[in-house]
Image: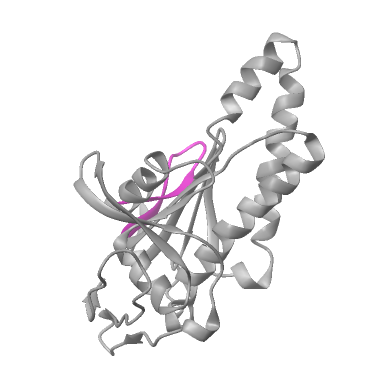
């Protein structure tokens, strides 16, 4: 029997190290491919270990493929995960943290790896597929858009959709409007970059009503693009 579950408001993150492949090719040419893989394993293990920390308890690693790391939050039905959008802010904090972690790896290994991150929110289907090597995964348009946010992003940047931006801006996170970009399968989208950690002095209220419809009320006016109020996400 196929295990699957519909999850209505999941925050998805893709994080990649685009210049890692160049590093691998260079070391493989010098017969040091194993050392390269050992370093990649260290980086992924560092990302994994961060998820054991209390601030990131809402986040689950989905998988890592090569130098790309995928994680999601809001997959459980525990209502406290959704309270005050903590699963979204936790993902933003985690993205900032792994960028710092990679910088630390660079400092100790004398490398210049660059992180590129994309974040989106929306409904997904979660399930386990496979008979001999079953694997848990998530699917849906929200996942595809999160992947596009990563692939169309910039090095050292954390690119988010407008829906994510509305929540984070209301929570006091600094963001910059990138403007409209072309996204495969979606056409033109206005996206934003997460610039740093939240400033609690700029926090606005976000309310969720009883039927789980998410209403975001944003009054922060320091971004480059106009902000719509009472946005349904």
Q: Is residue 9 visible?
A: no
Q: Name the foreground residue: 17 vs 197.
A: 197
Q: Residue at x 23, y 76 (%)?
A: 231
Q: Is residue 53 visible?
A: yes
Q: Residue at x 71, y 26 (%)?
A: 36
Coordinates of residue 141 in the picture (x, y in percent):
27, 51
**Residue 80 lies within the magenta run:** no
Q: Is residue 132 above or below residue 171?
A: above
Coordinates of residue 202 in the picture (x, y in percent):
47, 83
Q: Is residue 166 above or below residue 139?
A: below
Q: Name the foreground residue: 120 vs 106.
A: 106
Q: Residue at x 69, y 51 (%)?
A: 101
Quarter of the image where one finds residue 83: bottom left
Placement of the C terminus among the 4 image quadrants = bottom left
Question: Magenta part of the protein: which range?
Answer: 123-140
Q: Residue furthest left?
A: 187
Coordinates of residue 216 in the picture (x, y in percent):
30, 79
Residue 47 in the figure: left or right of residue 228: right
Tally the numbered discs.
0
Q: Residue at x 71, y 17 (%)?
A: 27
Quarter of the image where one finds residue 193: bottom left
**Residue 124 lies within the magenta run:** yes
């Amino acid at each position: 029997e196929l295990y699957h579950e519909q999850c209505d408001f999941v925050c998805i993150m893709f994080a990649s190290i685009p210049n890692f492949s160049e590093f691998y090719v260079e070391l493989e040419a010098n017969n040091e491919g194993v050392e390269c893989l050992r370093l990649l394993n260290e980086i992924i293990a560092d990302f994994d270990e961060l998820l054991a920390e209390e601030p990131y308890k809402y986040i689950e690693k989905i998988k890592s493929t090569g130098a790309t790391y995928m994680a999601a939050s809001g997959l459980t039905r525990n209502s406290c995960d959704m309270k005050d959008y903590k699963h979204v802010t936790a993902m933003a904090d985690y993205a900032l943290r792994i960028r710092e972690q990679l910088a630390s790896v660079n400092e100790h290994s004398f490398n210049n790896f660059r992180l590129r991150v994309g974040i989106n929110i929306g409904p997904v289907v979660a399930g386990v597929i496979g008979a001999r090597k079953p694997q848990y995964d998530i699917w849906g348009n929200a996942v595809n858009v999160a992947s596009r946010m990563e692939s169309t992003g910039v090095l050292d940047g954390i690119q988010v959709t407008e829906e994510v931006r509305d929540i984070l801006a209301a929570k006091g996170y600094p963001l910059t409007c990138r403007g409209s970009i072309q996204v495969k399968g979606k056409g033109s989208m206005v996206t934003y970059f997460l610039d740093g950690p939240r400033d609690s002095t700029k926090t606005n209220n976000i309310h969720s009503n009883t039927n789980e419809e998410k209403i975001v009320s944003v009054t922060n006016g320091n971004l480059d693009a106009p902000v719509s109020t009472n946005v349904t996400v």
